[in-house]
Image (tube, rainbow, N blue to C red):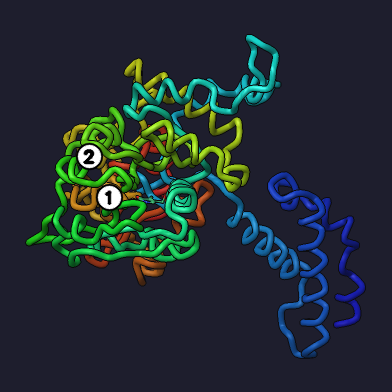
Amino acid sequence: MTVSILSSIPQIEKILQQAFISPYIERLSRPIVTDIIRSEVSAFKKYILSDKNNTDVSLDKLYNNIKHACWMMNQQRLQRVVNGTGVIVHTNLGRSPINAELWQSVTDVNTHYNNLEIDLSTGKRGKRKGIIQTLMTHLVKGEDTLVVNNNASSVYLMLHELTQGKEVIVSRGEQIQIGGGFRIPDILALSGAKLVEVGTTNITTNQDYLDAITENTAMVLMIHTSNFKIRGFTESADIKELAKELPPHVILAVDQGSGTTVEDMPDEPTVASYINAGADLVCFSGDKILGGPQAGMITGEQSLIQRLEKNPMMRAFRPSRIVYSLLEELAVRKLNQLDSGAGVAETKSTIAETALKHSAERLAEGLAPFIQVVRSDMTVGGGSLPDQSTPSWSVELSPKDPKLARSPEQLLKLMRSWPLPVIGVIKHDKVQLNLATIDESEMTYLRTQLTEVLQ
Ligand SMILES: *Cc1c(COP(=O)(O)O)cnc(C)c1O
């Protein structure tokens, strides 16, 4: 029996020709699928030989194992998902999706040669920046603007170039850790600057900053406390007053974070508002509220920006033509106030609550009691607008099949395994899908999947 099964295992080449394999070759490539088959065949042989009493030693079992291994690998490949979390700029879900029209519009420049580093009027070597500086002067009011790969690089570059061996004053209330291990104190240490903490976690006044200034102070760094907010009795410095009172040798830098420019985002201070208040430099991310590609931007006083540009680390931090082309196009669209320049945060957070309720009702129609329409909240997320949640509507799922209803975690897992994975959240021990972050184009698909699975 064992021997006959062993000898009946087809050659790898033959298994590769099985119909269920071909979509995986397309998704994962032939060499990778071949490796998977080889390792599953070898595991299967071991399994057969390990125990003479194994009951399931059919080829079907082998094929199922192979299919499962391919499927697991495919789940790790970067792919589109449906965001049902109600968090618009979701760090785990790729932050801001890039507007499809914007993306299309830079195809030509990216799929052909372009003038990335040639000055078309002189034919000489040119700068990477294109007209970013001019566009940004209008959009965020800084004299000059520098683009790097992400906002963590912005902070690092500012500190490395402008504060080495000197003191940087930071409020204790802003000693924050932003996402995956990006800690301001660590970055400060790396850049060779000395951190001088002032104030308390909830109160830092202008006088606290001024009292801490010495001859050796290079910078006051303010960080927009994005992903948390200390509630209650808080006071932070009045930046406009502080800018006036700081001695000339101290640079006032603000890490604004979210990159709010002309978007309609109530209560989120714009980059320009910090420049207008007298900040020398403001840095921000490209893929949060701005709605562009992953990037960091530093804007402000030209002489400082020029120093940053000459820093040797700039060679490591400079972004690609893909980023420049998207940012230029995005800025033009924002300045022309086109919808395609709005960014997902603005677009989604301004959808009327009644429209969201209507969408929830469409999803739930005829599927009660397995789907209920419930009130919920949406947030901008991505380290922006911490306190701000806006009313939204969700559908709450209660599957009929007790196997699915065993735990909400199990249902979430099932939805992640759908052909187009769906990411939901657990609220009050039930799985919810928030309509604020679900696209109109995803509604039919969702409705089909939910009908099939829940009833
Ligand atoms: C998001 C954020 C960062 C990190 O930006 P990345 O673009 O992810 O590198 C830094 N500072 C603030 C205030 C932020 O909100």
Which residue does the numbered mark 1 point to in the structure image? Answer: 224
Q: Is the CB of the residue bearing disc 1 within 8 angstroms of ligand 1?
A: yes
Q: Residue 400 in the image: state x and y as whole percent.
A: 33, 61
The amino acid type of the residue labelled 2 equals: Pro
In which image quadrant can residue 137 be found? top left
Identify the residue at the far top of this view: 121
**Residue 144 sits in which quadrant?**
top left
Label pair 2/1, CB-CB below 8 angstroms: yes
Q: Secondary structure at mark 1?
A: loop
Would you place residue 210 above or below residue 136 in this image?
below
Residue occupying image coordinates x 26% and y 54% = 225
**With 406 as the anchor, is 58 left or right in this view?**
right
Task: Please tell me which residue lies in front, 6 or 416.
Answer: 416
Q: Residue at x 58, y 49 (%)?
A: 78
Disc 2 on helix, strand or loop? Answer: loop
Q: Which mark is residue 269?
A: 2
Look at the image and tell me whether residue 130 can be seen.
yes
| Amino acid type assigned to the residue bearing label 1 in the image | His
State the CA–CA distance, disc 2 to disc 1.
9 Å
> Where in the figure is residue 2, as x and y percent of width and height?
86, 82
Does the beta carbon at disc 2 come under 8 Å from ligand 1?
no
- In the visual, does 228 lie left or right of 133? left
Please provide percent x and percent y for residue 386: 23, 52
The one nearer the camera, 42 or 104, is 104
Q: Which mark is residue 385?
A: none
Above or below, 272 against 182 in this view is above
Compare residues 41 and 314 and report the one nearer the observer.
314
User: Where residue 254 appears, x then y in whole percent?
Assistant: 31, 46
Q: Is residue 411 visible?
A: no
Q: Image quadrant for the C terminus?
A: bottom left
Q: Bin the neighbour count of mark 1 within 10 Å (Cα to Cα): few under 14, some 14-19, many 20 and up.
A: many
Circle 2 crowding by C-alpha within 10 Å: few under 14, some 14–19, many from 20: some
